[in-house]
Amino acid sequence: MVPLVEQPWLAVATVLSLVTVLAIGVWSGSRTRTPKDFFVAGRAIGLWVTAMATMTAAFSGFVFLGGPGLTYRIGIASLFIVVPVGFTSGLLCWLLAKRLRMLAEVGDVFTIPDALSYRFGSRLTTGLGSLAILIGTLGYLGAQLLALGILVETMLGTRHLFGEQSLLVAMAIGLGVLLFYSVIGGMMAGVYTDLIQGAVMLVGSLLVFGQSLRVGGGLRGITSSILASDGMEGFFEPFGRVPFSAALGFFFVFGVGVLGQPQMVHKFLMLKRVDQLRWMPLVLGGSQVVCLLIWVGIGLVVPALVAEGRLAALDNPDAATLQFLLGFVPDALAGLVIAAALAAIMSTADSFLNIGAAVLVRDLPRLFGRSLDRQLAAGRVATVALALFAAALALGYGDLIALLGTFAFGTLAAALAPALAVGLSWSRVSGVAASVSIATGLAVNLGLEVLTRVEGLPPAMAHLLSGFSIPSAVALATSFSVLFLLTWLGRDVSRDLPGELREIVELGS
């Protein structure tokens, strides 16, 4: 690890980033007085803040660190994850955003389980949805907190000072700042922190994309270098270095599964007015496209640099971003972009902290006929407890966190996307169909993810499960199929819905 004094721009960027979010936490804390403020930012957030908060919550460190590394490893097949961004913002707004925000007008809806409860009137559906969110929250938080510690360690050079305890110290620094603004200001602090962090992410992505083209000699130079290399076979094949089924799985899971990501859809409950959604697809989609330029730029230029011999082959593909930034980018820009990666990680983590805390202090107690009177105080305590538990898992049970981190997105997608996207748009969907769908998504995704890591499977089964994203894709498809089948075969429950709720569900039909 490079000592702190030899990487001043990284240290400066880190300190400025952490001080900024601390200041926002103090400002937001004075404006967080009720559970409504803590869980949905007072339901008084405008279009731009909501769009930026949704974008930053969706784009964790995976976009900045994992995405380019994945491209280096499997070729342009990784872009099947990126391409759906062209329509996912529209899907989110057309199928979910307006209905969720209107539910918040007629019911006491602060969380996604609140929305499930109000729509289906079923404790089982609400409980299973809460369980899925809690599992996904722990998986995401564990992975994000570990990534946060690694990044802070890199930026501050703590290994030079603390040796073997470096990661623990770095994680404690990042977690301390994250907890400060998350506990003090709740979602109010989260969304305004996301606004600042999102702006840094956008500027950094644009500048690094331009730098990657300059270093690589433009798209033509990058393409020529990769094609001429013997070690880059299959990089530009239509499905890269993965089977067709894996590329299709990427597209399906990240295109449709986004409808089940609570860290994103929860943001729509915060909008001040429903009519603000008119421009949401453009603002949200545009910001996502700009941010993903860093994935494309570094993901293409690093293989080209390796092919030309200007960069050593990577033992760990996840090091692609840091290798490029520290070796081919001006120090000031490198500091800005690594701060953007830090921002992305913290933005996703604070969203899940708030969502997980809401499950613990609001959603689960109501399932047992109880309601916590001091939800604001309990929410703050739950935020700390969740963060510490996830950090302990990340430090002590790395294999488990890797498993949870891998299937967290798929779990949330398979469990929640059908119930939310179809259930809020089709009045015939019953609580039974939604419950079985959620349970199926949870069970199939977890079961298949475990099977993919079991040694000694029959060759045919091992080959079937070997593709990337297949478990999540199968679980999501199965969950949708179960929901549709039970709805078609079951009784038409649309007439049982209260008038206001039925109007919301049948909106535009």
Image (cartoon, rainbow, N blue to C red):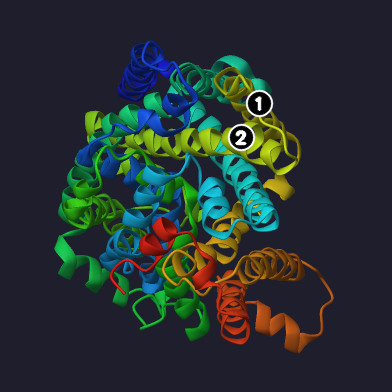
What is the secondary structure assignment of the residue under circle 2?
A: helix
Residue in the foreground of this view, choosing between 175 and 232: 175
Mark 2: few/some/many CA within 10 Å (<14, 14-19, 20+): many
Q: Return the residue at label 1.
A: 372
Q: In this view, does 156 lie above or below 51?
A: above
Q: Return the residue at label 2.
A: 362
Question: Which residue: 64% across, 31% down?
Answer: 361
The reply, left or right, for residue 325 in relation to residue 313 is: left
- Quarter of the rendering containing residue 496: bottom right
The reply, left or right, for residue 291 in relation to residue 391 is: left
Three-letter residue code for mark 2? Arg
The reply, left or right, for residue 324 in relation to residue 391 is: left
Residue 502: x and y in percent read 42, 64
What is the secondary structure assignment of the residue under circle 1?
A: loop
Residue 41: x and y in percent read 38, 29
Residue 63: x and y in percent read 39, 51
**Quadrant where the C terminus is found in the figure:** bottom left
Three-letter residue code for mark 1? Leu
Q: Is residue 170 above or below residue 480?
A: above
